[in-house]
């Protein structure tokens, strides 16, 4: 039996991975979390990522072989936590494989396009490269859950970037015809579970649940809601200036995510779409290795809005 530790197991992708992998009788799964969710049981350990020795002891005591990081690495502080986890994995001796936290898309080739998130995640990968651990990171594209919240099963928090289904509006980067890899979070867990058995990991593993354009998603949303949407298109020049067209749902985020910051982050996201970073190379995708994995389409997820 292989023992897997999931860091960041109390929410979002981490909790989804934790719940799904625990159903596999061939795995022993433990969670690492800064806080212990109610009803989590003895398999979740409350940890301090600044205490490398204590982290290593937990991994050693449980004979953990694979560490999966779902820590939300958005900057230097969270990056340091993940790097401490790497050092603890090395110190524990039992760990042979490590998944660093990404759950998104490949880095832009031009480092001037990198955000603090990229810099922090790159530092973890550089550290991993100095260890004897086999390691990888998962690229899953655009998380499809956002098009079905609150009407689908998910642990992801609501997030409206381009298509505001509740308010029948969309702000599309570029032409809206760029092909995008979308993946439902529970399908991510399926690919991760399958990849645990691969004899070798590349430094980057790709997967997707569906591929379509944002224009196609808008059409699906219009059909599901039987409504016309107010659609605007933001030019590449506008995106590169750090600006996007506002959507009604953005206003509710401003108390927590100030408008200038939200505009800058979402505009950067838009530039990644138009530059093709969300269009994964088919020959590198786990879908080819595991064709038996059934995934949820964007159409199925958006259909949750029918009658709403």
Image (tube, rainbow, N blue to C red):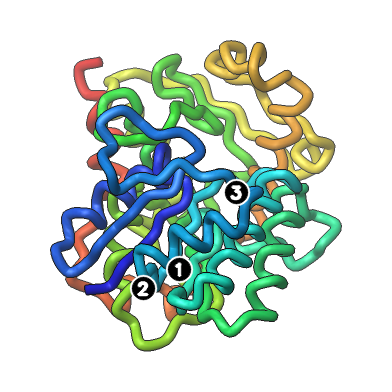
> Callout 1: helix, strand or loop?
strand
Q: In this view, does 157 lie above or below 83?
A: above
In this view of the protein, which residue sits in the foreground, 308 or 84?
84
Residue of label 1: 206
> Callout 3: helix, strand or loop?
loop
Residue 302: percent from the left, percent from the top? 30, 34
Answer with left or right where residue 184 lies relative to residue 77: left
Q: Check if mark 2's residue and mark 1's residue have beta carbons within 8 Å.
A: yes
Which corner quadrant of the image does residue 167 belong to?
A: top left
Residue 179: percent from the left, percent from the top? 49, 56
Residue 13 seen from this side: no
Q: Check if mark 2's residue and mark 3's residue have beta carbons within 8 Å.
A: no
Residue 212: percent from the left, percent from the top? 41, 52
Q: Which of marks 2 and 1 is nearer the N terminus?
A: 1
Q: How crowded is mark 3: few (under 14 residues within 10 Å), some or many (20 or more)?
A: many
Residue at horizontal 28 percent and vertical 37 percent from the top: 40
**Which label belongs to residue 49?**
3
> Mark 2, mark 3: which one is toward the viewer?
3
Residue of label 2: 286
**Count of numbered circles on the image:** 3
Give the Cα separation between the discs numbered 2 and 1: 6 Å
């Amino acid at each position: 039996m292989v023992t897997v530790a999931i860091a960041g197991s109390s929410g979002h992708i981490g909790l989804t991975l934790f719940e799904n992998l625990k159903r596999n009788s061939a795995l022993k799964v433990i969670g690492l979390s800064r806080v212990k969710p109610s009803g989590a049981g003895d398999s979740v350990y409350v940890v301090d990522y600044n205490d490398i020795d204590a982290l290593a002891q937990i991994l050693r005591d449980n004979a953990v072989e694979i560490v999966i990081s779902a820590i939300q690495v958005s900057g230097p502080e969270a990056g340091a936590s993940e790097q401490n986890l790497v050092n603890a994995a090395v110190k524990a001796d039992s760990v042979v494989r490590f998944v660093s936290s990404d759950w998104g898309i490949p880095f832009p080739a031009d480092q001037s396009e990198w955000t603090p998130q990229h810099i922090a995640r790159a530092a973890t990968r550089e550290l991993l490269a100095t260890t004897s651990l086999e390691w990888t990171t998962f690229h899953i594209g655009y998380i499809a859950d956002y098009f079905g919240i609150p009407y689908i099963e998910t642990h992801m928090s609501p997030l409206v970037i381009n298509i505001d289904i509740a308010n029948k509006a969309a702000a599309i980067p570029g032409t809206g015809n760029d092909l995008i890899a979308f993946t439902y979070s529970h399908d991510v867990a399926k690919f991760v579970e399958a990849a645990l058995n691969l004899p070798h990991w590349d430094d980057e593993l790709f997967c997707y649940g569906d591929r379509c354009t944002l224009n196609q998603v808008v059409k699906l949303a219009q059909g599901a809601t039987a409504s016309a949407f107010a659609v605007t298109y933001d030019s590449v020049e506008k995106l590169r200036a750090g600006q996007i067209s506002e959507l009604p749902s953005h206003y509710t985020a401003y108390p927590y995510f100030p408008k200038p910051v939200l505009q800058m982050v979402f505009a950067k996201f838009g530039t990644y779409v138009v530059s093709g970073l969300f269009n994964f190379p088919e020959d590198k995708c786990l879908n080819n290795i595991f064709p038996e994995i059934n995934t949820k389409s964007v159409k199925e997820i958006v259909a949750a809005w029918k009658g709403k």
